[in-house]
Image (spheres, rainbow, N blue to C red):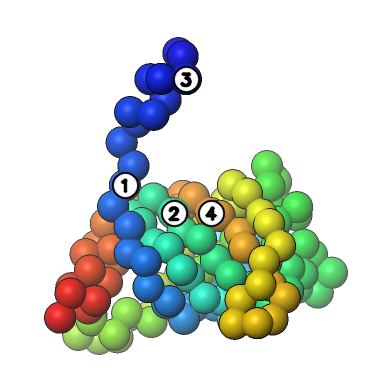
Amino acid sequence: MDLMMAAFFFRSPRIDQDLAMRVGLQDIHSHEPLPGQIPTTVVNFSPDGACLIIPKVAIDGKHLFFDTLNSELYNLVLFFEDENDENHAKIAISARPIWMDACEYQDKPAFKIGIRFLFKQDRLFKNLQKKFSS
């Protein structure tokens, strides 16, 4: 495939809003979250993935990017309470990191991590679209 064809790949629709969530680590085999979570701001959300801004990149000595990238032990997991759901469903979304970079957010040093969800989040995406279109 040449470079010109790459420009025509479909890109999922996105929500460019600051979404407050929490991020942590999840055991790949048991799917249980490990202790500890970091507040995160999701600045770009699609059914396929998101961009997280986090104040630090480690939980209990485990690096959120390097200890989950191609790992056979850990996934990332996002925690979110869906206010649009009647029962305020608490959602845990398993993901893998794609890229990471240092940044500044609200005049403080931070890190950006691009993630890809292990399972598409169409329902949550539609709920968030409704929330931000009203």
Along the line of sight, the residue nearer the viewer: 132 or 116: 132
* Residue 73, percent from left and from top: 70, 52
In this figure, which residue is indicated by the disc labeled 1?
12
| Viewer-side label of 1, 3 | 3
In this figure, which residue is indicated by the disc labeled 4?
115
* Residue 41, percent from left and from top: 52, 76
How many angstroms separate mark 1 from mark 2 (CA)?
9 Å
Q: Are marks 1 and 4 in contact (CB under 8 Å)?
A: no
Q: Secondary structure at mark 2?
A: strand
Left or right side of 17 for 106: right
Q: Earlier in the sequence, mark 4 or mark 2?
A: 2
Q: Amino acid at mark 4?
A: Ile
Q: Amino acid at mark 1?
A: Ser
In this figure, which residue is indicated by the disc labeled 3?
3
Q: Are marks 1 and 2 in contact (CB under 8 Å)?
A: yes
Residue for point 27% across, 72% down: 128
How many angstroms separate mark 3 from mark 4 (CA)?
24 Å
Mark yes or no: residue 30 visible: no
How many angstroms separate mark 4 from mark 2 (CA)?
5 Å
In this figure, which residue is indicated by the disc labeled 2?
49
Residue for point 32% across, 79% down: 82
